[in-house]
Image (tube, rainbow, N blue to C red):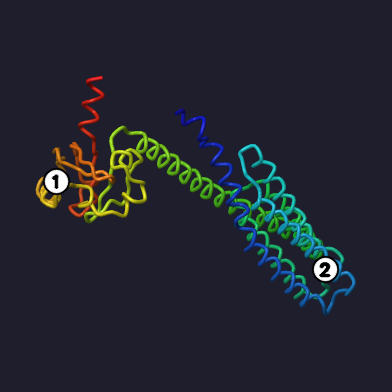
Amino acid sequence: MNMATVHDPAGDFHIKRINNLFANTPSSMVSIAIGIVLVALILSVSSSASLLKLWVTFMLSALALRGGMWFMHRSASNNPQSARWWEFGYAMTMFFTGIGWGSLSGPLYPDSPSGQVFILVLTMVVGFSGAIYSSVSRLSFFMFTMPCVLPSMLRFVWTLDPAVQLSGALASAGGILVLINVHETLHRLAIRHLRHEVEVETLLMEQEMIFQSVSAGIAVVRDGKTIKCNTRLGEILGRSLKDVQVMPLSAMFTSAEDVQTILAATANTLKGGEPIHALYRMRRADGSEFVAELSGRRMGNERGGDMIWLISDVGRRDRRADD
């Protein structure tokens, strides 16, 4: 089987990246809901009630849009071709939410200095939260952060005394650059982590394919019990993989003496990591017996580590050789 036809690491990376992006949606929606409540409580004293209701309605609509997008993604069958479209859809929901936060620096902007500081701090906190929640997507970050933070920064600079507006503008620009730098740092870390996950999953998948395609039976044994085996071992023993994994090692052999011999050989011969080779009689599920060649080695260098056994049906192998 050609693994390239069934597994695409690059495609898996994009799917995992988008899944990670949407996985943060529920927690981000909770944060948005808390922010809406705080803004409504604080601005209800100084702002127009009709404008505040309009803003709350818009934010709740944007929140519902994000929730709907999250639900559709959760129910969809994702593939590498649709990953970009899902990212764009997510970025658009972030964009509308960012517009909502940025609009607080418009007609709802409070007259009191304390209220103005609240709006400035709120938009900066929201901007940094956007850097976290959209750490795997630059598109989503910029489409959310710019309409959220820029209006607040511009309004802040506009309200300053003309003598210090330049300093305020430079400070605001520095804050935005810091925000972008934070996101870039988080983005690099998140992408590196996702690529590592994909590499590990690809390696495990390749190992599993090799494990299942070996012509000999393979059993990983721990404390006298098979904890993992391949399909070939089940065929040799005439049992399902589930049955093999729950049955004790002693049930595979025709005599308890052989089992004790194997355990003793395991304890003595494999201490130094040396393999063991031997012929034993084993029993199939239908009660028939056959001669099996066993090759065992301890996994790792630990004395208490798991054992891996290769088991071949000698009789069947000899008959194939004669044919």
Residue 55 in which image quadrant: bottom right
- Seen from this angle, which residue lies furthest top? 323
- Seen from this angle, which residue lies furthest bottom? 45
Which residue, given by chain and number where applicable, does mark 1 sit on? 270
Callout 2 amino acid: Tyr
Quadrant of the frame with the N terminus: top left
Instruction: State the residue at coordinates (74%, 73%).
Output: 37
Front one among 321 and 124:
321
Q: Position of residue 176 (x, y in %)?
A: 67, 54
- Looking at the picture, does residue 323 appear above or below residue 61? above
- Looking at the picture, does residue 212 appear above or below residue 44? above
Give the side of residue 210 with respect to residue 222, left or right: right
Q: Position of residue 163 (x, y in %)?
A: 78, 62
Point out which mark residue 109 bears.
2
Callout 1 amino acid: Leu
- SS state under label 1: loop
- SS state under label 2: loop
Q: Position of residue 268 (x, y in %)?
A: 9, 49
- Looking at the picture, does residue 249 appear above or below residue 168? above
Q: Position of residue 220 (x, y in %)?
A: 28, 47
Instruction: State the residue at coordinates (24%, 39%).
Output: 310
Residue 164 in which image quadrant: bottom right
Point out which mark residue 291 bears.
none
Mark 2 or 1 closer to N-term? 2
Quadrant of the frame with the C terminus: top left
**Front label number (2 vs 1):** 1
